[in-house]
Image (spheres, coloured by chain):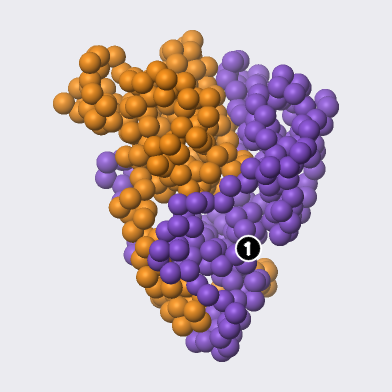
Amino acid sequence: MNGAHDMGGMHGFGPIKAEPEATEPLFHADWERPVLALTLATGMLGKWNIDMSRHARERQLPADYLANSYYETWFAGLQTLLLDAGLISDEELASGKMSSPNADIEAPGPKRAAEILARGGPTLMDIPMSPQFQVGDHVRIINAHPTGHTRVPRYIRGRVGVIDHYNGVHVFADASALGQRQGQPQYNVRFEAQELWGDKARAGDRVHLDLWQPYLQRP
Amino acid sequence: MPHDGPDHTEPPGDIALRVKALESLLIEKGLVDAQALDEIIDTYQTKVGPQRGAKVVARAWVDADFKAHLLRDGTQAIAAMGYEGRQGEHMRVVENTDHIHNLVVCTLCSCYPWPVLGLPPVWYKSAPYRSRAVIDPRGVLAEFGTALDDSVDVRVWDSTSEMRYLVLPQRPTGTEGWGVEQLEKLVSRNSMIGVEKARQPEDVS
């Protein structure tokens, strides 16, 4: 979707104002800890995947997305995921009180949670699919504007790049956000900065992105 | 709330209270385990952080075979050091040289190699960094005080899939004969994102 999350190349946000590495705290408010932990812990219930959780965050109203801190965005996304999955009701969210128990769900305990974090969720799929493009091929990025989740930022749409690396068959994010575990060949594609940003960009600078085959066409 | 669409106005409320209320509800419903929440927080507060990435980089600086393995198969080389898991399932290490400087960003969200760098800093997830890193990487580097020679090309890695990137910074001169533990102190988190170079020997003496 063409949302506020797709920020590459936007102007006007001002300086980065990074806190010094040596003194920046890991969390900036106590409530950020439970937002992180609740998001990861509920994700372990298997009711959604990482692409669905990304889409829940980017579906916020653009004004909210831009105004929120990142953990506020995670909190907004978490509520959307819980409601969409039917794990909580609007009434429960509003009141903070349980209306009905979720009988069939067993939350992982600390040991199991640690194991799940340590294992992660690999997206590489061992299925026989031949890549359509080879390293060195020129590719043009499709000019598509899906209203669902996609990992093609606006700033590369319609632009021509070169296949830099073949990453193998990976779970395709656009389908994954709809709950489908579908594999597609994935490539690292390099773009000349001038192809993306025009003559004022420095010749020789490049931007690399990892892109699935359905995003690519012959130029 | 966002899922209700534009007609809904979110009632005012302190976010800390709303988070607490949701946490209590989810525990009451058995959807999360309170001890598991503590375990998750403890993992990223005390176990997983950029000290791990520093060990990877310092080892690559002293061990040519390891470095070759790291650049060829980052996932496997890093996993062999015991660093793997969520948000580091597929790792690629990109090397800074006299001619190339690498910079990592996630313009669409906040993708970041957790097993080797921990949780991302606020600025990495911020609109200014995400918007500017791809269109004005040299301006971003300048803001971090990082100057590049005219002959150096910039490579920006926008993390749009589950591939995660770690920058292998250049080993500072004047560190010949240093041990791995000494070298680790030179490897800042920011140098592994690519916004800075590794610390100089005089910075840590």
Q: Nearer the viewer, residue A105 or B157?
A: A105
| Residue B86 relative to residue A100: left or right | left
Q: State the image quarter where residue A154 is shown.
A: top right
Would you say B112 lies left or right of B47 here? right
Residue type at the position of mark 1:
Trp
Q: Nearer the viewer, residue A88 or B163?
A: B163
| Direction top: furthest residue | B151
Q: Is residue B155 left or right of residue B46?
A: right
Q: Residues within 10 Å of mark 1 (few under 14, many from 20)?
A: some
Chain identity of mark 1: A
Q: Residue at x 74, y 56 (%)?
A: A180
- Judging depth in this view, the residue of A15 and B18 nearest the camera is B18
Horizontally, is B195 left or right of B47 in the view? right
Residue at image coords 42%, 20%: B65
Residue A134 position in % (x across, y down): 75, 23
- Tell me what residue is drawn at x 55 percent, y 39 percent: B90
Classify mark 1: helix, strand or loop: loop
State the orange chain.
B
Q: Position of residue A187 (x, y in %)?
A: 68, 32
Q: Position of residue B140 (x, y in %)?
A: 46, 31
Quarter residue A65 falls in: bottom right
Q: Residue at x 22, y 16 (%)?
A: B177
The residue at which mark 1 appears reads as A48
Looking at the image, residue B25 lies above or below residue A125: below
In the rendered structure, the colour chosen for chain A is purple
